[in-house]
Amino acid sequence: MDAASQVSADAVPRRIVYVPRHPLNLRQTLSPLARGSMDPTHRWEGAALWRTVNTVLGAATLHLVERAGEIHATAWGPGAEIVLDGVPELCGHGDDWDGFDVSGNGFLAELLRKAPGLRLLRTNSVFEAMLAAILEQKVTGIEARRAWRYLITKYGAVPPGPAPQGMRVFPDAGVWRRIPSWEWHRAGVGPQRSETAVRASSVAASLERTLSLGRGGAEVAQKLRSLPGVGVWTAAETTQRSHGDPDSPSVGDYHLPAIVGIALIGKPVDDDGMLELLAPYAGHRQRVMRLIEVSGVRKPMRGPRMTIQDHRRH
């Protein structure tokens, strides 16, 4: 196919309408995907989401909009069919809330009643989720989002179709392996994180194979954590998005234990306290975390904060 024909083919939209079997709040369900409001791979426009994806067949641009209980999905690019096939799982298909009993906790029961459209997403893109989580290791959200935006904008391709200006496609593993050390430095990513990212890019295909093991669990976590530099927190942040893991609380997070403690007992707790509070919901602990997240409960803005470090100056 010549260049002109490829451009023409990429401009042809493909469409499906997904009708979920359960109530679905698109924004609540897909909110964990965007790394800040300026994420080059995701853009919300009102109730509609633009998402760019790098598939085994090439780049794709996906547009999702919720209308009267239906999800209208349009995709462009060589990977269009793959992303359209993934729309149901992206929107929570296969996420089974049976057995999730919060009747003994009035606060959680009320949250569940108010958020019937909340589901756990599954992107089926492990390396992408892990790379983003690696950039977020032990730094502030501002630093992590700045690094993500810089690297994706510089090394990501312009997406196919009518994606909003400034959007880019997550680069493939080969591109990440070739990013020079000074560009990681300019992005504010220290050597430990950049080396872990490069290691992950070298085994990207193996990471994707963990999808065949289901929606997370001990075996998946063990395989992800076998990569040096990937610990409990990074593995959990990955499987929450890529696998749709219902039981992967982010142990080691700077803010989450306090938020969980405030939500459930009215005061901050540490990691051990968070795990103790979540223990009655084993098998569904990430569902509890997502309910608390959409509730709007926040950590009090007082006390010491994590210092923003500018790695670019060293």
Image (tube, grey):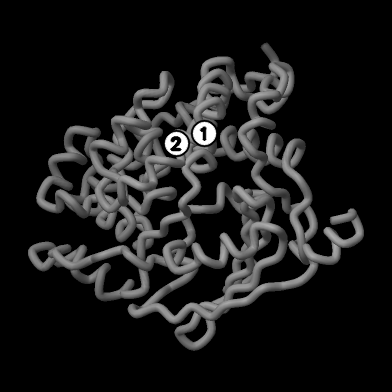
Dot 2: within a 10 Å radius of its alpha carbon, few (fewer than 14), some, or many (20 or more) residues? many
Give whichever of 206, 145 is nearer the camera. 206
Q: Which quadrant holds residue 183?
A: top right
Task: Residue under label 2, please give it.
Answer: 207
Q: Amino acid at mark 2?
A: Leu
Quarter placement of the N terminus: bottom right
Vertical comparison of 168 with 101: above or below: above
Q: Which quadrant holds residue 25?
A: bottom left
Q: Which quadrant holds residue 15?
A: bottom right
Q: Amino acid at mark 1?
A: Ala
Task: Give the CA separation, mark 2 to mark 1.
Answer: 5 Å
**Residue 4: x, y in percent?**
91, 59
Label placed on residue 196: none
**Residue 200: x, y in percent?**
51, 28
- Residue ID at (35%, 27%): 225
Vertical comparison of 112 with 42: above or below: below
Give whichever of 172, 111 is nearer the camera. 172
Task: Residue under label 1, please give it.
Answer: 204
Give whichever of 18, 209 is nearer the camera. 209
CB contact under 8 Å: marks 2 and 1 = yes
- Residue ID at (38%, 50%): 243
**Horizontal relation, residue 86 to residue 37: left or right:** left
Residue 144 appearing in the image: yes
Quarter placement of the C terminus: top right
Vertical comparison of 92 with 131: above or below: below
